[in-house]
Amino acid sequence: MADWVIRLIEQSGYLGVAFLMFLETVFPPIPSEVIMPVAGVAASQGRMSLGWVIASGTAGAMLGNIVWYLAARALGIIRLRPFIDKHGRWLTMSWRDVERAEHWFRLHGTFFVFLGRMLPTVRSLVSVPAGLLKMRFKSFFIASTIGTAGWTAMLATAGYQLRENFGDVDRFVGPVSNAVIITLVIGYLWRVWRYKPHNEG
């Protein structure tokens, strides 16, 4: 995959970086942990500007973030109520939990989105709850942009500093991503085991 990313960035420059980061957001198996360090290496070789690499990567990712947010907002959580009521155990939530989440999101949603954009693995999924729970677009956009810019800057700068050894970035980020996945799986299984439906009405 790295060879394909390198060729596209070499041929398309900043537009290629933005396009790849857009794909990474809507199709997470294309990893930003490869895209941005490769672009950082190109900047270190004088073929691109590090600042514009970060800006183009952020812009592409933000376009994908907005697509997911708008799709989730158009769907709306209300339409999912029958599904939640029927499969609450496996979703580990009842409708009362959804109402609590809406209240929590109004208070802390901005920080949740900002932090989520800085976490490997889950960063591409943050837009969905934000859209479903109708977080204000302005707050979503600002928090997402800051978090996304921080993530892309970290990866691009690592590639810029490490140059041809940018694979070291994945050797660090990879275990962190795996740890996040394992934590999420354990947390989900714990919630399924402990789940007790609320009496509605």
Image (tube, rainbow, N blue to C red):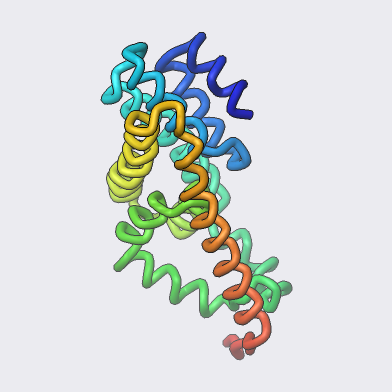
Q: Residue at x 37, y 60 (%)?
A: 112
Nearer the observer, 182 or 112 = 182
Q: In terms of image quadrants, where is residue 111?
A: bottom left
Going by the image, does 4 lie left or right of 37?
right
Viewer can see residue 73: no
Residue 38, position in %: x, y? Answer: 46, 27
Residue most extreme to the front: 165
Of 143 and 103, which appears nearest the observer?
Answer: 143
**Vertical order, 100 against 133 (above or below):** below
Q: Residue at x 51, y 9 (%)?
A: 11
Q: Residue at x 33, y 53 (%)?
A: 114
User: Count of labels shown?
Assistant: 0
Where's the N terminus, which quadrant? top right
The correct choice, above or below, for 197 with respect to 101 in the image is below
Q: Residue at 41% of width from left, 55% of height from top?
A: 116
Name the spot of residue 143 as percent of width and height, x first: 30, 49
- Which residue extends farthest right? 86
**Residue 24 visible from this viewpoint:** yes
Return the x and y of residue 184 as percentages of the image width and height: 57, 67
Q: Nearer the viewer, residue 10 or 134?
A: 10
What quarter of the picture does the C terminus occupy? bottom right
